[in-house]
Amino acid sequence: MEQDNISQDVTSQLLFTNQVAETLDGIVEKLEPISVHVLVDANTASFVLPRLQAESEVIRNAQIIQTGGAGDMHKNLNTLSGIWQKLSDDGATRRSLLINVGGGVITDMGAFAAATFKRGIPFVNIPTTLLGAVDASVGGKTGINFNTLKNEVGLFADAEVVIISTTFFRTLSSQEMLSGYAEMLKHAMLTSREMTDRLLRYDVTTYEPDSLLKLLKESVNVKCGYVKEDPNDLGKRQSLNLGHTFGHAFEELALERRSPISHGYAVAFGMVCALVLSHMKEGFPSERLHTYADYVRHHYGVFAIRCNDYDRLLQFMAHDKKNAAADGLTFTLLKDEGKPVTGINVSADDVKAALDIYCDLLM
Amino acid sequence: MEQDNISQDVTSQLLFTNQVAETLDGIVEKLEPISVHVLVDANTASFVLPRLQAESEVIRNAQIIQTGGAGDMHKNLNTLSGIWQKLSDDGATRRSLLINVGGGVITDMGAFAAATFKRGIPFVNIPTTLLGAVDASVGGKTGINFNTLKNEVGLFADAEVVIISTTFFRTLSSQEMLSGYAEMLKHAMLTSREMTDRLLRYDVTTYEPDSLLKLLKESVNVKCGYVKEDPNDLGKRQSLNLGHTFGHAFEELALERRSPISHGYAVAFGMVCALVLSHMKEGFPSERLHTYADYVRHHYGVFAIRCNDYDRLLQFMAHDKKNAAADGLTFTLLKDEGKPVTGINVSADDVKAALDIYCDLLM
């Protein structure tokens, strides 16, 4: 049985296993909750819950809470209120357990619901997407979108346990796999050239569950390291923001164009820009920039922009709360693979120059 | 300047002062928030805010958030959502400060809003009622009512500072003063006969601000001691529940009769019952029971009940989450003043006997 444990001082216990039902039943037996409640969305209700109900006694006997839909548009106060209502109506107490089964939307929102129900009940997260497993599973960020702003309402709260498995990914599209993989590539670049090369060679679209689980564990471990050092996201943890300043701006521009792109894709494209800036400002090796850009062009394609989008992109970057600086913008960059630097001040002209090169590299 | 400090390991810094504006301006100068937002309800908007605006530069320059009404019926998701909305619209960031000015409803709800806005912004509480100052100011319990249940949604969160002053009480009725005073009497009984006697001699309806501030500080300090020892309310802190099992049942019966009574009055009456039980089960001195019952009858009157209310009261007690026991009910009782005992199992017959004696003593 492939199972292992990352102990974290500041966050939840992480279990990596492809024997989910067995693992879950063992955990719940130890936690001894008075009642068990399982949160799913439309997707996990169809594709994941039936299997879990067949294999896990805990899930079979649990009360089910199904949200109205799936996706980020449902990560709102209305859905949250429905979860609280169902917990309350089903008689959940402070000694009940909530198990969140789904992507980042479900685990973020379910965790927030649990952390605020009767001043906090324990919860377990079971991410069912690669992006959720690699990104949302660690760090305790929970919440909902509010007033059209992402994660405007939320708090830091830790799951009792997060169970990470690659067996849930079989119903995901290649695009969904690549979306999560962009964050894994980011973790690799923050760590070493060796790790990056291993990931660039691996084909995530035709993955084999156990080998991917191993890579995933290594990747999540990178994030754990940063979170442990800086749980409140005030310093070192901002390394994890690599590629995200550009990435968020791309996401918002795409939303404005009414053809949204997924978070992971935006990060993949944003990383190209961040590496260009890293080359310009911090001497990141040009050859490695080209290796990564080729990979992105080949697997992700391109998010097409034109010169007259630059000012709008700069506006989005200036509004991102993580980039606040008196003048100009601040970025996380790389001196080299494994050598991140945070809080680097960059002028608008340099950002535009980087966007020019991004276009040259990918378009 | 009468000002002092109770340092608490587990909760907020408490400042006792009748120089509120000056104190507040000093605190905010140290906290250096990017923006200041002040939460008030209809009452504090009329009776407290104008004075604070005249005296405090911080409040004068702050953005005001006024809830739709005042009172427990407004402590709901709708009001909470309005607070989040206003914070968001007014551009509050993680480095903004929310100052909650009001009774327990405002400080509980404002604290919850702050603790969950952008995963938590700092907040300061300024209780403006005696009940809020003595009861809601310490312990970090925040939240809203939901699904007709009190504080069904909430969490533990600590204010940066709580400023406690008796100068706000001048617009309160004698009834509101007595309501808060019931909790002060409870704290005294948990502490010593000497403290109880001092409070029984003091006339809270014709109080002088500085002498009341001194008593208030002593009283809040009692609560701090219990909270410090048991922040998550799992053991020793349950001493603070003295009188509340009966008290909550009286409150709910009153609500069902459609003539609600205030929390403090319910506690005053509930304490009489708890002392009767304490006498029956733990040898609490009969003479002190009579002293307290006389005081309550004289100052609070009586909450009238009849024999055919007993079963309904027992049902309410059984539903109170704090009294959970396999069979029967559990109570916090006193062996003597200053000698609380928690988790005492009591049969329904003994509860009924105590209610009989309550009727004899007060009616």
Image: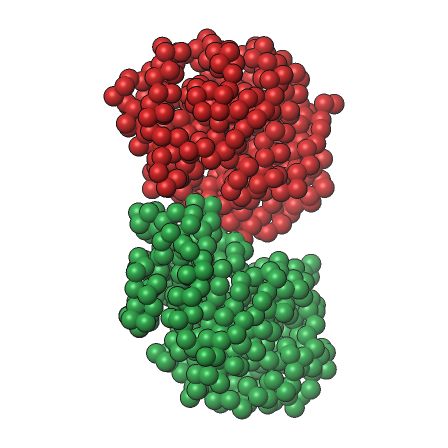
Chain colours: A red, B green
Q: Can residue A209 be seen in this view?
A: no
Closer to the camera in the image, B88 or A65: B88
Pinpoint residue B335: horizontal percent, then vertical percent.
71, 79
Q: Is residue A156 visible?
A: yes
Pinpoint residue A103: horizontal percent, then vertical percent.
51, 29
Closer to the camera in the image, A360 or A108: A360
Pinpoint residue A141: horizontal percent, then vertical percent.
51, 39
Q: Residue visible at 40% across and 11% down?
A: A361
Q: Residue visible at 32% across and 65% down?
A: B57
Left or right of A147? Residue B191 is right
Q: In this view, does B128 lie above or below B234?
A: below
Q: Residue visible at 47% across and 35% down?
A: A343
> Residue placed farthest to the right in the image?
A1
Pinpoint residue B271: horizontal percent, then vertical percent.
58, 78
Q: In this view, does B152 lie above or below B285?
A: above
Closer to the camera in the image, A225 or B218: A225
Q: Residue visible at 43% across and 87% down?
A: B208
Q: Quadrant of residue B111?
A: bottom left
**Total number of numbered labels?**
0
Left or right of B260? Residue A192 is right
